[in-house]
Image (cartoon, grey):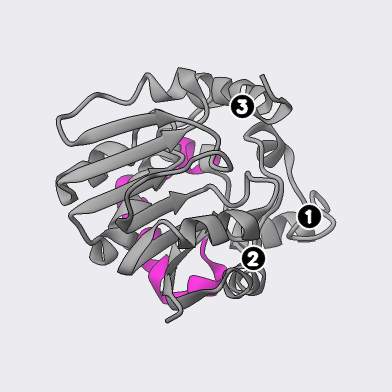
């Protein structure tokens, strides 16, 4: 077993044991944000984890392939007639077919070489296909507040939760756009997902549903300060 495979297996335990209900709500908000950009019939999901996003994507594709290196997570993904599950490191994944849509939600912050993965994913797209990326935003309000409180030296520093879930970086908008450009992809749209002034755990413990919905909508109005960045890319042809 490679060091990277062992690292991912260790991180998988957090997703199985420590994930909050609000973490799962954030998956729904990501889905709502990327929904207008989904295009079939063939889809690829990188980093399916235990399948929260996978079951939302399934109805939009005649054939959906999901890839994850953590077997303990992949086995949690429910089977479906139009779903193919593959256990592999993204760096080793070699599909024979091409895809209309590739979804890579919360992937780039985990991998050793994000630009190399984007270049590989570029080759997995059909002509006219879309690559949809989602990453945490270093300039989310809750991270900027953490800097003012002295909890972080810089908004791009890794906090305790980042380390637990295996993040190697936290993206600014500019850094994400640089990596996209360096890979040869073309950025066609960018949106913000959820305006988050406090931690997920604090939201889960203290906010009501109206507040949660309101801050989701606010994230669309202030994308540069939202909790996450959603970027839609195409082949730069």
Residue at image point 57% right, 45% down = 199
> How far from the left and from the top, in percent, is residue 9?
60, 22
Q: Which of 152 and 176 is in front in this view?
A: 176
Tell me the distance, in whole angstroms, between the alpha carbons under discs 2 and 3: 25 Å
Query: Between disc 2 and disc 3, whose residue precedes?
Result: 3
What percent of the width, then of the height, locates residue 114? 63, 55
x 47%, y 76%: residue? 187
3 relative position to 64: left or right: right
Assess whether mark 3 and mark 2 are in contact (beta carbons under 8 angstroms): no
Compared to residue 155, the image places residue 81 above or below, namely above
Q: Is residue 164 above or below residue 208?
A: above
Horizontally, residue 56 falls left or right of residue 234, namely left
**Mark carried by residue 139:** 2
52, above or below 100, in the image: above
Q: Name the residue carrying label 1.
A: 149
- Element type at mark 3: helix
């Amino acid at each position: 077993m490679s060091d990277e495979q062992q690292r991912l297996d260790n991180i998988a335990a957090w997703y199985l044991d420590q994930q909050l209900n609000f973490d799962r709500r954030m998956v729904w908000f990501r889905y709502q944000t990327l929904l207008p950009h989904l295009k079939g019939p063939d889809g690829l999901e990188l980093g399916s984890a235990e399948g929260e996003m996978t079951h939302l994507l399934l109805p939009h594709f005649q054939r959906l392939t999901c890839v994850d290196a953590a077997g303990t997570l992949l086995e949690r993904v429910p089977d479906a007639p139009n779903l193919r599950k593959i256990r592999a490191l993204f760096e080793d994944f070699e599909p024979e077919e091409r895809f209309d849509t590739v979804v890579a939600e919360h992937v780039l912050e985990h991998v050793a070489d994000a630009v190399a993965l984007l270049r590989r994913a570029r080759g997995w797209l059909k002509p006219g296909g879309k690559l949809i990326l989602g990453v945490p935003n270093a300039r989310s309000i809750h991270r900027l507040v953490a800097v003012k409180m002295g909890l972080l030296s810089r908004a791009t520093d890794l906090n305790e939760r980042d380390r637990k879930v295996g993040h190697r970086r936290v993206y600014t908008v500019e850094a994400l756009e640089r990596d996209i450009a360096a890979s040869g992809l073309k950025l066609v749209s960018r949106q913000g997902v959820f305006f988050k002034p406090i931690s997920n755990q604090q939201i889960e413990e203290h906010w009501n549903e109206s507040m949660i919905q309101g801050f989701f909508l606010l994230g669309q109005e202030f994308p540069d300060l939202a909790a996450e960045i959603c970027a839609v890319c195409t082949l730069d042809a």
